[in-house]
Amino acid sequence: MTTEADSISVELGSEDVTILANSSNTVETDLDVDELLHFGNIKSESKLLLQSALPIIMSTTTQLLIMLPMMSAVGGLGTAALASMNLVSIYAGLCGIAPLSGMAMALDSLCSQAFTAAKDKRMLGLYLQRVFVLILGVETVIYPLWWNAQPIFKHIGVPDEIARIAGQMLRLYFFGVGALLVYECLKSYLFAQGIRRAAVIGQACCLPLIWLSIWLLISNDTTSLGILGVPS
């Protein structure tokens, strides 16, 4: 072995391998920094990111546009109705929506990996079916917590009227959670394949119908179901 200031020569059999001592000064890269920072590339990449993010932004905005008139309509029913709705939102989130949504969002990574790396693209459908079965099993477990929510609320000190209204809402709301989770799973399934417009178009088409149902089931005096119109 011969050692010099600039290099080390190692003899391996019939080959000589030279290892540069100052390798940090001789590293070469195929990335052209000037090219990466060129205005044209930044502009095109920003446009691509905006196009990818826009459907998600619109989807979130649509959900807020649903909640705003609903909260306003419930507020017109009285403070007890508004308090019951807030209690239902917290309880449903802790005892169902949070864990079930986490399972649905797992498809974001699983389907993305399957779509980009797996040779068999049918893995996307397999993941989707497995998540459906898993969610159905978890819903079966949490069903008693939702159906018997009224005595639970009373046990923790919630006023009787609010506990009664919230318990009735949860019994109806439980049947709509399944449809919500199916939508979230299908949205993740499509987003992983780069299909983002379908969810946005679906929400945009349903938004006027939801506003109409809020008016008919909550606000309109002749057809209103009261606070029970919220989960309906």
Image (tube, rainbow, N blue to C red):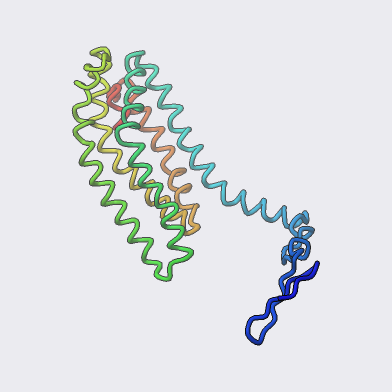
Q: From the viewer's perspective, tell me whether residue 5 is left or right of residue 147.
A: right
Q: Work out which residue is located at the far bottom of the displayed protein and give it.
A: 14
The relative height of residue 42 versus residue 14 in the rendered view (above or below) is above
Q: From the viewer's perspective, tell me whether residue 13 is left or right of residue 213.
A: right
Q: Residue at x 41, y 55 (%)?
A: 189
The relative height of residue 30 versus residue 42 in the rendered view (above or below) is below
- Where, quadrant-wise, is the C terminus in this rendering? top left
The relative height of residue 226 versus residue 231 in the rendered view (above or below) is above
Q: From the viewer's perspective, tell me whether residue 25 is left or right of residue 157.
A: right
Q: Which quadrant of the structure image shows residue 172?
A: top left
- Where, quadrant-wise, is the N terminus in this rendering? bottom right
Residue 145, x across and y down, in percent: 22, 31
Q: Residue at x 72, y 53 (%)?
A: 42
Q: Residue at x 35, y 26 (%)?
A: 90
The relative height of residue 200 versus residue 30 in the rendered view (above or below) is above
Q: From the viewer's perspective, tell me whether residue 22 is left or right of residue 171.
A: right
36 or 191, nearer to the observer: 36
Q: Which quadrant of the structure image shows residue 86?
A: top left
Residue 8, x across and y down, in percent: 73, 71
17 or 55, nearer to the observer: 17
223 or 10, nearer to the observer: 10
Residue 33, x across and y down, in percent: 76, 58
Q: How many labels does the image show?
A: 0
